[in-house]
Amino acid sequence: MTRSALKTGRLLWYSILAFGLVIGLYGTAYMLQHGHEAAFNVTREIPWGILISSYEYFMAASAGLLLIANLGYVFGREEFKVLGRRALVLALFTMVAAFAIMAVEIAHPVRMVIYAILSPNLASPLMWVGLSYGAYGLFLVLQLAAVLLGRERALAALGVFGILASIAVLTNMGAILGVAKARPLWYGSFMPLYFAVSGVVSAAALLSVVAFFSDRISGVTEKANQGLKALGRFQGIALAILAVMVVWKLIPGLYGAPPGKYEATLALIEGPLAVNFWVFEIILGLVLPMGLLLGRDRCTPVAVMASGVMASMGVFAMRYDLIIAGQIVPVRKGVDGLVDGLLQYSPSSIEIALVVGASALCLLLYSLAERVLGLKNESF
């Protein structure tokens, strides 16, 4: 790529991200001026919308990225060490995006932190999520510091705790849904494992896209290509496991038509969420990426990147469908506004603007870090 083309491409890229950030800032200003009720389409019956599903997407991806980085640092896999710095930095900024979304979704985020410290409720799953976030953030920052200071031995030791913190984050996030007995689609021990696997898939997908385009800008090496191919093989296996889990998520919802769970499952496969489910979750998120990755000599850098783009979109839709499908079956009688027995939700323009802004913030911070910190093809 010529210097002139590179400069033009960067200018265009930063302009797009700046525009996305402005959209997010507008959404934030509108929400602060008019309040949550006017800005968001959530209701008493459906209190969680696209902001919660997007927050879960970014936070699960962040935890998955730390796990992938530590495949190299802890287990000594050289092909993953090449991706380590990028995985750690991307983990930090996807966490920032998740917290940015949560900050605008919660009416009083500062009050939440204060009372979590002053009067913690250890019986609440949300409390344990918060504690796991604290441990996760600590070890992520410590690992980043070890990388930047060149402390390889400390990095490997910290990575063990980073893996444990990542697993705690992913499983506790799933547990928030799994203990919700009033929401039959979510209830049960399946959710923590489902969150863990889908979080790893979203992490591998994001990292493959970022690594591919970053290498094309800074210069491709054989070592970088080998790392990308190894990530593609890992992603293909994770996608296959996730596909099996999606099948087994549906079967208990259909077999015997369990009340609440059956209606929510039908909403996914033939109801208002069917297009999302079949087009984005199944075809775009699972079938096409696995077709590109599974098989001898299929993991070319371009195939890995393309599958990463599709899988990222698929898991994002997966998070949205899970959150909404779990709530559109009414839990009390006499609810107004039902269509075919189901509640209705679609994200408002302000909710979408906030998701766009958080995504732009994540990518902008990462893009700046790529240039400032020198993340290309580091051995550790």
Image (cartoon, rainbow, N blue to C red):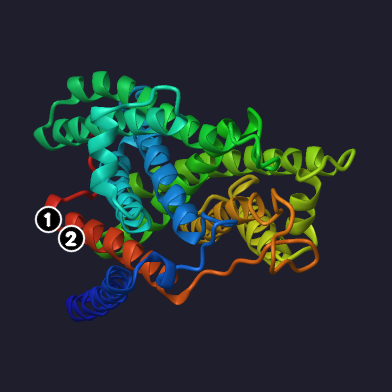
> Dividing the picture into quarters, in which one does residue 320 lie?
bottom right
Furthest-left residue in this view: 149
**Where is residue 218 drawn, in percent x and y?**
23, 60
Horizontal relation, residue 196 to residue 265: left or right: left
Density class for disc 1 (Cα within 10 Å; few <14, some 14-19, many ≥20) is few
Whole-number angstrom distance, CA of label 1 to CA of label 2: 6 Å
Going 38% across and 26% down the picture, which residue do you hit? Answer: 121
Q: Nearer the viewer, residue 351 or 276?
A: 351
Specify whether residue 222 is in view: yes
The C terminus is located in which quarter? top left
Residue 96 vs 234, above or below: the answer is below
Picture residue at 69% right of the left edge, 59% below the top: 277
Looking at the image, which residue is at 40% across and 36% down? 68
Q: Is residue 213 left or right of residue 155?
A: right
Residue linked to disc 2 = 368
Secondary structure of the residue carrying numbered label 1: helix
Q: Are marks 1 and 2 in contact (CB under 8 Å)?
A: yes
The residue type indicated by label 1 comes to Val
State the mark number for residue 372: 1
Query: Where residue 62 sits in the image (x, y, percent)?
Result: 37, 43
Q: Is residue 184 above or below residue 316?
A: above
Out of 84 and 324, give the one closest to the viewer.
Answer: 324
Work out whether residue 120 or residue 302 is closer to the camera in this orientation and state it.
120
The image shows residue 230, relative to residue 19, as above or below, that is above
Mark 2 residue crowding within 10 angstroms, few (<14) / some (14–19) / many (20+) = few
Q: Residue 219, image x and y in percent?
A: 26, 59
